[in-house]
Image (cartoon, rainbow, N blue to C red):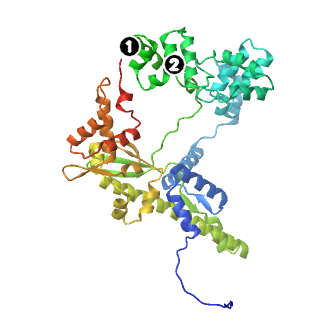
Amino acid sequence: MAMEMRQQLKMSQQLVMTPQLQQAIKLLQLTRLELQDVVRQELEENPLLEESLEADEIRETEQTEQAELIEREDAPEAPVEDFKEVEAGDETLRDWDSYLDGYTYSSGEQYREDDERPSFENQMTRRGTLTDHLLWQLHMGPFSGEEVIIGEEIIGNIDDDGYLRASLEEIAAACSIDTGLVTPVLERIQEFDPCGIAARSVQECLLIQARFLGMQGSVVERILQHNLKDLETRKYKQIARDLSVDINEVLMSAKIIGGFDPKPGSMYSSEDVHYISADIFIYKVGDEYLVMLNEEGLPNLKVSPYYAEAKTNGLVDSRADEYINEKVRSALWLIKSIQQRQRTIYKVAKSIIKLQRDFLDRGIEHLRPLVLRDVADDIGMHESTISRVTTNKYMQTPQGLFELKYFFNSGLSTSEGDFVASESVKNRIREIIEKEDPKKPLSDQKIAGMLSGETVNIARRTVTKYREVLKLGSSSERKRHF
């Protein structure tokens, strides 16, 4: 078969995403804080983009400047001679100045101007960590130089929960010593505060705490040594038979063990608390719900008029003119994309309010099943757009703070032919378990029966799935004997 090369014309259609469209899609799914970073970066890179003052701020600035100007014009000029007479002759003022010069602040430092004061960051102290606390005890204890080196290596391998995550052989190799020298140092570090630190397993951690309380040889120590698995599954009768002790003594020991801390290092956790800032606020005014977007930290953007004026007056060459045109288009598209993002979020919020009105009025038990297509059809947009809008965005409602995705959930049928949201069923399961008798917890089958009595058609395996999502234990795990 002969092969040849030839030219051929062909017409076809294809969907191409321009860089501007990609930017608009990206902005749509960003959180408010991420959007602030994008805007800040664009302000630094694009000289034609600048912040615009609000009209109120402009008026306030103009009024302030005008008032200061009037005040300067109306103020009488004081004769220079009067000031000289005060400086030279007024003993009271001189005494008052000397008093201020000699005044000692409680901090022991005097500052004549705010610029001389230390910054706020310099007055802050770093939060103590678990490693700092352990190293302080190590260096304050009667350890030799070699033992301090071993102890520092041990402490450096303790995780945030307080467990040693390196073997004795690895520590010995890191310190270039024999393994036998590590064990005595480890045993002494395990006596440090908090109690149970530097353990290599949960069992060892709990045993350290039991021995610290002087329970060597007690039922508590024997349970931890031989029947920890049975204790986890609450097989108290089995433990009593294995240890040949009374069941009441086993229950008392289990109660004591329940007061131990399996993560002794957690109290020194350095993790910061992250607060959620709502992107949308819902306020009820009369019988209507109003939507307000949280635009805090988002500057009002505009195209700088300086470069447009320079271009109009012919002060730029062809290369600069091309650069200005490119940056103008970039700035205008960013402004347009942000405005479109805010309008889309507003429309989605309004639609959710309309479709979930009963939830806002009466609570979670009235949350209705909702899918992305319902909102998409309501506001005339594609489902993918709704999905991007609801990503990592939160709404503050009269019922609390919720992620937008919270309002989209599947539904279960009822005996009356209606549907109830899965989140409402989960909340009902949680309420049933919270009100149950802890000595006689309800099985999943009984919970399913109770929900069926409330017209919700639900299977036992569905109750089990929802219970596990809620991180609630089974009936045997929830059972309390004391």
Q: Does residue 97 sit above or below 405 in this rendering?
A: above
Neighbor class of circle 2 (other Cα within 10 Å; few <14, some 14-19, many 20+) is: some
Instruction: Give the x, y percent position of residue 420.
Output: 27, 49
SS at mark 2 in the image: helix
Residue at the location (68% across, 19% down)? 186
Q: Residue furthest left?
A: 416
Depth order, front residue of 117/471: 471
Mark 2 or mark 1, earlier in chain: 2
Residue at the location (41% across, 23% down)? 234
Depth order, front residue of 106/318: 318
Residue at the location (61% across, 63% down)? 304
Instruction: Give the x, y percent position of residue 123.
Output: 65, 28
Neighbor class of circle 1 (other Cα within 10 Å; few <14, some 14-19, many 20+) is: some
Would residue 465 appear left or right of 229 to someone viewing this image? left
Q: Which residue is labeled 2 in the image?
A: 226
Q: Which residue is labeled 1 in the image?
A: 247
Number of numbered tags placed on the structure image: 2
Cα separation, mark 2 vs mark 1, equals 16 Å
Quadrant including the N terminus: bottom right
**Residue 204 figure quarter:** top right
Q: On residue 83, which mark appears?
A: none
Instruction: Give the x, y percent position of residue 172.
Output: 76, 25
- What amino acid is at disc 2? His
- What amino acid is at disc 1? Ile
Q: Does residue 21 sit above or below 91 in this rendering?
A: below
Is residue 102 visible in the rendered structure shown here?
A: no
Depth order, front residue of 340/122: 340
SS at mark 1 in the image: helix
Residue at the location (66% across, 56% down)? 44
Is residue 443 visible in the rendered structure shown here?
A: yes
